[in-house]
Image: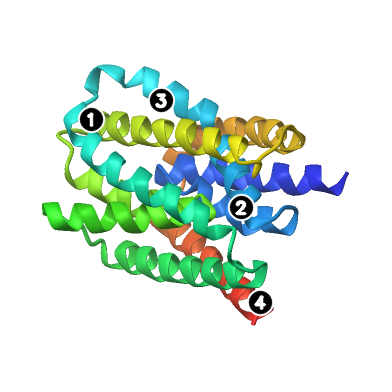
């Protein structure tokens, strides 16, 4: 029964990070889930954990959706994600953990620097969008972590906060339906994984709500920095333990 405590703790942290930063739940879930499940199953469970919160946000901001900004990035992203999902079955478990560790470390450094220096990007050209979509799709198929670069793309390419939230949440809901269908049809996910997903959804929803209430009372910049450091240390752990 110890898995219940791990899932709840992971989902609570993921919900809190999602509530504070607006994304990143998949990154946090993938810190903990590989201790319980193979990495390809962990990615599927991680993706579905936030699905209810995702649906709620899509519905809430549906009037601000701009389909034209979603279709091209999603097609590129989805093709790469499906390809990397297929390729993941040929990687040994320790090799996948090395890749996951490196990804977490790079993301940690990237967001820590962005946070400390308060860097913002005003525009992203078309060719950068293609690169972002390919990289995000690759790591989504491997680990269920496709959010960071796509969040940056939509943030710089949206007319308002509501437009940003509508576009990115719709993008990830489409991704969830596509990748979950493929993972179940290919046998990566099975009905035995539903218990992890159900417990995770409860924890994630509760803590997302809590984070939204607390966000006005926290030093958000400092909290984000601590979160990014924790992600980097977790990546270092996976890297060292797999070498």
Q: Residue 57 carries which label?
A: 3
Q: Which of 200 and 114 is in front in this view?
A: 200
For marks 3 and 1, the one nearer the N-term is: 3
Q: Residue 242 carries which label?
A: 4
Q: Which residue shows up at 33% across the image and 67% down it?
A: 116
Which of the two discs, 3 and 2, sits closer to the camera?
2
For marks 3 and 2, the one nearer the N-term is: 2
Disc 1: which residue: 163
Q: Is residue 149 above or below residue 199?
A: below
Quadrant assignment for the C terminus: bottom right
Gap in angstroms between the C-alphas marked 2 and 4 = 16 Å
Query: Percent position (x, y) of residue 109?
Result: 40, 71
Gap in angstroms between the C-alphas marked 3 and 1 = 11 Å
- Assess disc 4: are there few (<14), some (14-19) or many (≥20) residues with their C-alpha within 10 Å of its C-alpha: some
Q: In this view, does 136 lie above or below 16?
A: below
Q: Which of 65 and 225 is in front in this view?
A: 65
The answer to whether residue 8 is visible is: yes
Query: Percent position (x, y) of residue 34?
Result: 68, 57
- Assess disc 3: are there few (<14), some (14-19) or many (≥20) residues with their C-alpha within 10 Å of its C-alpha: some
Q: Which mark is residue 40?
A: 2
In the rendered structure, are the residues bearing label 3 and label 2 in contact, judged by CB atoms less than 8 Å apart? no
Q: Is mark 4 on a helix, strand or loop?
A: helix
The answer to whether residue 123 is visible is: no
For marks 2 and 1, the one nearer the N-term is: 2
Gap in angstroms between the C-alphas marked 1 and 4 = 41 Å
Q: What element carries label 2?
A: helix
Classify residue 204 by image quadrant.
top right
């Amino acid at each position: 029964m110890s898995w219940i405590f791990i899932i709840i703790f992971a989902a609570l942290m993921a919900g809190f990070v999602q509530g504070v930063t607006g994304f990143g739940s998949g990154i946090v879930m993938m810190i903990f889930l590989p201790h319980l499940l193979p990495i390809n199953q962990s990615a599927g469970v991680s993706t579905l954990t936030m699905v209810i919160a995702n649906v709620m946000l899509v519905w809430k901001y549906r009037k601000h959706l701009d389909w034209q900004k979603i279709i091209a990035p999603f097609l590129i992203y989805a093709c790469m994600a499906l390809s990397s999902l297929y390729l993941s079955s040929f990687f040994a478990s320790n090799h996948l953990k090395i890749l996951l560790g490196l990804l977490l470390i790079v993301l940690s450094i990237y967001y820590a620097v962005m946070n400390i220096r308060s860097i913002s990007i005003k525009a992203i050209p078309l060719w950068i969008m293609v690169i972002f979509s390919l990289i995000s799709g690759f790591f989504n198929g491997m680990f269920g972590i496709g959010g960071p670069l796509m969040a940056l793309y939509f943030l710089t390419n949206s007319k308002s906060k509501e437009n940003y939230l509508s576009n990115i949440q719709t993008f990830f809901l489409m991704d969830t339906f596509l990748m979950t269908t493929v993972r179940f049809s290919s046998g990566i996910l099975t009905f035995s994984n539903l218990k992890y997903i159900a417990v995770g959804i409860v924890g994630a929803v509760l803590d997302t709500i809590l984070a939204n209430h607390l966000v006005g009372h926290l030093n958000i910049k400092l909290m984000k920095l601590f979160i990014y450091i924790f992600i980097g240390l977790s990546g270092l752990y996976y890297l060292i333990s797999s070498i």
